[in-house]
Image (cartoon, rainbow, N blue to C red):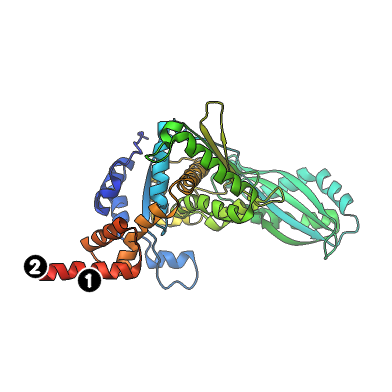
């Protein structure tokens, strides 16, 4: 695969068709793939009907591309499916600053997922735990009989864990975890099938009754990480020195680290970057969200997913480590035509690479929010981009959209009633000519 250049200079000023042509060339898409991106009906109704129930049509989101991302020295374009203004622009701008300081460093753990098997009706839960552990090889071998394809790819059940929950209102519970290497799959179907297949053996070993047999979305063994370091120089603005910006960002981060009310919004901003990547690639964004927020309170306190600090040079250093249960095979990643194209645009070869890219985007999004909050405030940039939506809501079309949005931006007054007034004046001006 030929290397690509992820820089997108003046991308916002291009028409959608011109942007599409740029991405087609940059990602090496063939004419059929380019036509799908150009066709709003890429997901036809018959295909959609095979994906979920009660289908009456399809629902589209804007699909944008964030640029300037460099991960471990490699350029990457980032497709993002999202309806919220400023998300793609913020990610791209931060990636551009990070790029000047060397880009993102990323890494990840192997793709291990957990399946839980709940056992009830035990008088000797700790004894049952010991027996399950003693016969672990037998359980693992039985689980691995269920997916020969996964075994052939180098995956499979690797180990078991057994936890005793002694004090519940339903009596003591033994919960056995299957630890499964799912390779490039998200893994839900695989681990669920394995959990169900070993349940009769678990009942035989323990003498208890198996109830739930289901994966855990707290994928704490399947972590993706990203790290950035930014110099004061790249963070300097017309109004603020870089060192001052760093101190302000650290103050804002500390607020999120200690206060759950702030942390909830802080982490939502991180997911503003991650979720659009997950959606664009056909992955389960609800699973990623669930794991992220459970991870954020794993120590008994809900806090920031990211960490920000200052190194010995005075540079701002940020890092993000979190569960990232994503896949390249199975589900919508294979059935949705545009998800396949999104993955091709990214150029990722493994699920781990996809997870690392998503976390890098989340870190960039967090940096953008912290920088804005700590300096000019979040609304200036966001509302300037939101002005186009407001102009459309007022009835503006074609070139009117940019004219009305620009006027509201200059006035710093982005409201639907103001957009109506500006549009009325604009149309009155042209009718008089």
Q: Nearer the viewer, residue 372 or 74?
A: 372
Q: Is label 1 in a helix, a strand or a loop?
A: helix
In the image, residue 1 above or below residue 255: above
Instruction: Indicate the quadrant where residue 40 lies.
Output: bottom left
Q: From where the camera sits, is residue 312 visible?
A: yes
346 left or right, relative to 408: right
Element class at badge 2: loop
Between the residue at mark 1 and the residue at mark 2, the CA separation in whole angstroms equals 15 Å
Q: Is residue 218 above or below residue 307?
A: below
Q: Residue at x 21, y 69 (%)?
A: 425
Residue furthest to the left in view is 433
Q: Residue at the top extreme?
A: 313
Q: Where's residue 49, x and y in %?
A: 44, 68
| Residue with the mark numbered 1 | 424
Quadrant for the N terminus in the image: top left
Vertical relation: 210 (above or below) 18: below
The residue singled out by tag 2 in the image is 433
Question: Residue 218 location, x and y as percent?
Answer: 65, 51
Residue 308 x, y percent position in the rendering: 56, 39
Viewer-proximal residue among 361 and 127? 361
Looking at the figure, which quarter contains the C terminus? bottom left
Mark yes or no: residue 182 visible: no
Q: Residues within 10 Å of mark 2 (few under 14, many from 20)?
A: few
Callout 1–callout 2 Cβ contact below 8 Å = no
Q: Is residue 413 above or below residue 182?
A: below
Q: Earlier in the sequence, mark 1 or mark 2?
A: 1
Q: At x 55% / y 55%, what residue is drawn?
A: 265
Q: Residue at x 30, y 49 (%)?
A: 12
Which residue is more in the foreground, 407 or 179? 407
């Amino acid at each position: 695969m030929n290397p690509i250049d992820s820089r997108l200079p003046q991308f916002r000023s291009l028409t959608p068709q011109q942007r599409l042509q740029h991405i087609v060339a940059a990602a090496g898409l063939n004419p059929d793939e380019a036509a799908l991106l150009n066709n709003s009906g890429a997901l036809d109704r018959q295909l959609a009907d095979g994906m979920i129930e009660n289908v009456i049509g399809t629902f589209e989101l804007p699909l944008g591309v964030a640029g300037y991302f460099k991960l471990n020295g490699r350029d990457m374009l980032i497709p993002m499916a999202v309806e919220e203004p400023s998300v793609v622009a913020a990610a791209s701008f931060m990636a551009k600053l990070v790029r000047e300081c060397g880009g993102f460093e990323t890494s990840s753990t192997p793709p291990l997922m957990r399946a839980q098997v709940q056992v009830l009706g035990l008088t000797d839960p700790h004894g049952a735990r010991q027996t399950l552990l003693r016969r672990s090889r037998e359980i693992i071998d039985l689980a691995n009989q269920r997916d020969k394809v996964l075994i052939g790819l180098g995956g499979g059940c690797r180990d078991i864990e057994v936890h005793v929950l002694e004090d519940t209102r339903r009596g003591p519970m033994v919960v056995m975890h299957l630890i499964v290497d799912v390779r490039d799959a998200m893994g839900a179907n695989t681990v669920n099938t394995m959990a169900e297949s070993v349940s009769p053996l678990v009942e035989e070993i323990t003498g208890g009754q198996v109830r739930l047999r289901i994966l855990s979305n707290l994928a704490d063994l399947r972590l993706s990480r990203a790290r950035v370091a930014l110099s004061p120089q790249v963070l300097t603005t017309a109004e603020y020195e870089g060192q001052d910006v760093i101190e302000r960002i650290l103050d804002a981060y500390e607020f999120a680290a200690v206060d759950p009310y702030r942390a909830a919004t802080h982490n939502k901003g991180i997911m503003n970057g991650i979720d659009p990547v997950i959606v664009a690639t056909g992955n389960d964004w609800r699973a990623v969200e669930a794991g992220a927020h459970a991870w954020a309170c794993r120590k008994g306190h809900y806090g920031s997913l990211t960490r920000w600090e200052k190194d010995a040079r005075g540079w701002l250093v940020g890092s993000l480590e979190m569960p990232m249960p994503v896949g390249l095979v199975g589900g919508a990643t294979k059935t949705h035509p545009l998800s396949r194209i999104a993955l091709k645009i990214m150029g990722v070869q493994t699920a781990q690479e996809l997870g690392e890219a998503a976390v890098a985007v989340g870190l960039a999004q967090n940096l953008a929010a912290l920088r804005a909050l700590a300096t000019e405030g979040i609304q200036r940039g966001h509302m300037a981009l939101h002005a186009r939506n407001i102009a459309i809501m007022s009835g503006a079309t074609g070139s009117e959209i940019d004219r009305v949005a620009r006027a509201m931006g200059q006035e710093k007054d982005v409201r639907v009633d103001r957009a109506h007034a500006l549009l009325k004046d604009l149309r009155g001006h042209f009718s008089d000519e």
